[in-house]
Amino acid sequence: MLTLLDPAALAVRPLPHSTGRRSALAHWLTQPGNPLTARVIVNRVWQQHFGRGLAANASDFGMLGEPPSHPELLDWLAGRFVREGWSLKKMHRLMVTSAAYRRASRHPAPEAGKLKDPENRLLWVMPPRRLDAEQIRDALLAVSGELLPEAGGSGVTPDVPRRTIFTRFMRNTRDPLADVFDAPLWFSSAASRDTTTTPVQSLLLANSAALRARGRAFAARLEATAPGDTAAQVQAAYRLAFGRAAQDSEVRAATEFLAKQAAQSDTKRLSSGQAAFIPEKVPYRDGQAARITPDSEQMLFRVSDSKALQADGAFTLEAFIVPRSVAEGAEVRTIAAKWNGDKTGAGWSLGITGQQSRRKPLTLALQLIGTHRDGHHGESAIFADLGVQMNKPYFVAAAVTPATAAAPGRVFFALKDLSNDDEPLLTAGVEHEVTGGWSNTTPLTLAARSGTKPHSFHGAIDDVRLSSVALPADRMLYTSESVSDTTLGYWRFEAKPDVFADSGPHGHALERPTP
């Protein structure tokens, strides 16, 4: 008991590994004679089932709070809750089997109810409720057949199709679906949620990249359920989406609509790689980027080799990225590469180091595989020691100058946190011993490298530019998006003229290989 209310000393029983003070407080809060704790708990449970608590102010039971609509019911529920051993399971069962919960949301003669109780505080009908943000996301993944059922383990990013309860929510990189459907801000507790209806919700459900991906997965699931049978696919769609069979009129309407759409569709465009491109938006940037997920249909892009890409001298690789995860081991997640992973061969690769990197985890690293100043041929790993954080947008660059017989070479790294205007462009100059010899005919790849171990990137990649010179900071993409005769390739992933087009002078269009 607080000494302000009871000056007597509190009985505290020390425990083997505790003073016992917190246990004493817990016992006081839950003693049967305390009327507040049980009333707050059952009011919260009621709020979850009915959308509004018996006392509307879920966290304010004081003088400023709104009086409960059914005070006797609230007291009776609190008393029963305590008598049944504070069992939430029994309280849930009691509420969902009650007559109030089982009422329909429509009344055969609603006029009298609307006059006497227009806000439905007395629950003469069941109030219709919109799903919460987490329920909407889980339902989308369940209907499309993508939801991963396993429980437990570490949290995942929103692009991983597990239940939302296992999703990490970052304050500086929020999930758009959760935002528009009124999810809390997550850095403070919320006694209740707002429930809004806005045009942005409809636009996101109709046009967002995430919802288009769910639509493609749902279509593939229906096609696999009944190949070539449109009517059976419509029936399957109704069962999965609405939990009921489709009426004959609904099957006819859907079949006619699909036939009409097929007749009007541009088959050439629908079969193109652009139609299957999975876009994403990099925060604080205009336009669209490429969403990259390891072992998915969009895990890398490739540029067919040409003589212009076989240069053995200086070069600069730049990109805008949002890393979602890095490897648990020491391997590097690839941003771009011209290498197949063979350390006895030739090539280069730029990426982000893994959690157990021998030098430094979560930093930019360039691997050069070529001829060293002492004459031997092999790999040289060059670390920027410029750390990145997951789910934050960055500009990254590596400008490479080869070594010579008289002097070591240099890699000029650049890194800029796009989410913080006050953060300067971070740079690091690191010497190396490779004189050249990294030229090869291996295709240039973005977001992964060629070979059996692609070490794929995970996140978003945008505006990748490769130049045939070592660019200084003031000519890099962060400040200058121009194209010159030194630009070997510039891939922006914009719909016009084409997501795979090269904005540089050589026309090195991307292609997306099938996994």
Image (tube, helix red, strand yellow):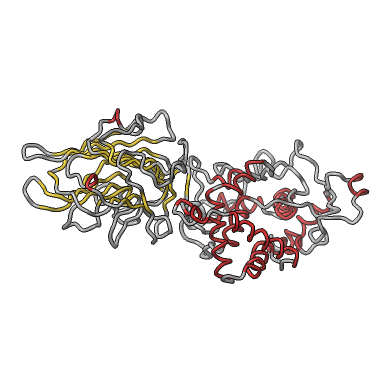
Picture residue at 75% right of the left edge, 49% below the top: 53
- Say if residue 457 shows up in the picture: yes
Where residue 510 sits in the image (x, y, percent)? 36, 49
Q: Is residue 4 above or below residue 24?
A: above
Asked whether 438 or 52 is in front, the reply is: 438
Asked whether 149 or 495 is in front, the reply is: 495
Q: Quadrant of residue 235?
A: bottom right
Q: Is residue 123 left or right of residue 166?
A: right
Location of the C terminus (image quadrant): bottom left
Q: Is residue 21 left or right of residue 369?
A: right
Asked whether 324 or 450 is in front, the reply is: 450
- Say if residue 182 shows up in the picture: no
Q: Is residue 366 left or right of residue 215?
A: left
Q: Is residue 86 above or below residue 284?
A: below
Picture residue at 86% right of the left edge, 53% below the top: 124
Q: Residue furthest front?
A: 263
Where residue 413 sits in the image (x, y, percent)? 27, 37
Q: Quadrant of residue 246?
A: bottom right
Q: Is residue 469 above or below residue 135?
A: above
- How many badges with numbers are in the image? 0
Where residue 337 sits in the image (x, y, percent)? 28, 50
Picture residue at 60% right of the left edge, 53% below the top: 134
Q: Is residue 323 left or right of residue 232?
A: left
Where residue 76 sits in the image (x, y, percent)? 81, 56
